[in-house]
Amino acid sequence: MNNATEVFQPLRADDPPAVAGYRLAARLGAGGMGRVYLSHTQGGRPVAIKVVRPELADDPDFRRRFRREVEAARRVRGAYTAELLDADADGVPPWLATLYVPGPSLAEAVARRGPLPVPAVLWLVAGVAEALQAIHGVGIVHRDLKPSNVLLAADGPRVIDFGISLAADATSHTATGAAVGTPQFMAPEQATAGEVTAATDIFALGQTAAFAALGEPLYGDGPSATVLYRIVHSEPDLSRLPEQLRPLIARCLAADPEERATPAEVVEWCRQRLGRDADAGARPSVWREFIGPEVTVPSPVVAPVPAPTRVQTRPFVVTQPQPQPQPTVPDGRRARRRRNALITTASLTAGALVMAGLAWTVADAGGRFRDWVAGSRSTPGPQVSERSSASETSTGSPSASGSASGARGETQETSRPSPTVPATPRAEPHPLQMLDANTSLSFKKPIHRDDRKGDIRFDCKDAGCALDSDSSVFVQMMGASGTSLDECRLFLARADSHRWPLAAAANGSEICVKHSSGDIALLVIQTKSTAVPDLAFLQLDMTIWRDAA
């Protein structure tokens, strides 16, 4: 990820050129809450702009939580946090801006270079623990601390997305009653939908430290349900960790939140192991080698200035009229000139009348063409014939023809419906719905059903796992994420599949659904667990547009 072409992706056709005055220079990525862009402050300092997904933005409860969490996050000031600079919870859509951190995430760095050496892990854990001190100090619990939310800058780690995840999590939790977060890095109380406290972040810190040292999640990969079961019911296997790190990580991963270390204790423990390097404030050379060279951040985007319009003008000189001598004209010639002027005036008047009649005829034909496009009769009916006859017998005045039609109780335009542009249906978000062998989803409320009588069902019985419906058709979207209503309409126009196999679907896959009533839905898979058919489930976001087909 040190290649600038990998870090900074070009803007796409559906990306805005600017957000609330911040001109966007590149894409940085996308996450559960929305897209992230690179921009700059007025002084040229790089910032990361996160734009909230439309489905979440349309939820008033989300906006209220988002506003509260943003206000709390503004108070966080720490050397190892990406400071929140600006935000607008009432924007369309909502957005926030944080300092841009030039460096890969821990997840990206480990994927590229493998596990960190012990000194680098100690620096990492000390920095993240100090960030948690600042975050917890203003009453915020991160709730989703994980390797992808820890950025590795040249001078130490930076924790991002603190507190903001609560706004989205609360929406999901309210909708489904299920635990929300990243399964591999949850604490036991989080996995069982218990009380979430600052100690929950310490458990995630222990898991993040183990990931940095091992190069993989401590509790393993696999279906979310399996991983969560291990976290809740089994002791972590610390034997694979370097011996120097085991005591600290074991303390962080205590099952009882009361027995876990505090951020201050974690920082002190790491400083003791780092020795004189910690007192000198010097990071080991292995840290710099691990994160690699800094990328070159693109320059700020300058607002385009329209080119001045060049207007060719002629000199304008005002002169006083000079009296001209009047020539003596014989009476006969003066009479001929008067007669010629009258003839010219009459010719011009006749020409103007002809042009007016032609313009009215063209406008009348255009009106008939618009009526035909709007769905009126394709062959001339009595109204058209009568209007034509009236125009032929009139004295050339369009108003005379209109008055004749009006006398017969007819109107030329108002009796026909005018075409109207249909309003865009409002997106109706239903985040993180659960589907398994005993539940279903319905287009009518309640959306989630605890039986199999809904419109969309899920099973893994016949030839693999699939979505099934008697009333709806499916089509899976391939390629980039962020499918729009218009794209769903296009691909559903000829869809006829009432059962859609999920063999090619993964986390992040998007499936368009059209109900027989005309409602359209977009399903975005968040968690797909199908390894054990009897325990298989889907966790997905559902957005509905009513009467959209």
Image: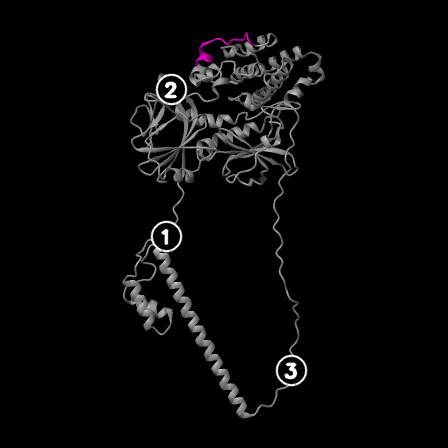
User: Looking at the image, can residue 219 be seen?
Assistant: yes
Q: Quadrant of the N terminus?
A: top right
Residue 355 pos. (x, y %): 44, 70
- Dot 2 or dot 3: first in sequence order is 3
Residue 12 pos. (x, y %): 53, 38
**Callout 3: SS:** loop
Q: Say which amino acid is labelled 3.
A: Pro
Asked whether 501 or 354 is in front, the reply is 501
- Dot 3 or dot 1: first in sequence order is 3
- Dot 2 or dot 1: first in sequence order is 1
Task: Look at mark 1 in the image and give the residue it sits on.
Answer: 419
Q: Residue furthest front?
A: 463
Vertical side of 247 occupied by 428: above or below: below
Residue 19 pos. (x, y %): 55, 39
Mark in the foreground, 3 or 1:
1
Dot 3, how many residues are within 10 Å of its Cα: few (below 14), some (14-19), or many (20+)? few
Residue 543 pos. (x, y %): 40, 33
Mark in the foreground, 2 or 3:
2
Task: Look at mark 3 in the image and give the residue it sits on.
Answer: 323
Q: Say which amino acid is labelled 1.
A: Pro
Q: Residue at x 69, y 11 (%)?
A: 275
Mark 3 and mark 1 in contact? Answer it, CB < 8 Å: no
Q: CA distance from mark 2 to mark 3?
A: 103 Å
Q: Say which amino acid is labelled 2.
A: Ala
Q: Residue furthest bottom?
A: 331
User: Looking at the image, can residue 431 be seen?
Assistant: no
Highlighted range, magenta: 229-240
Q: CA distance from mark 2 to mark 1?
A: 50 Å
Numbered circle sitting on residue 536: 2
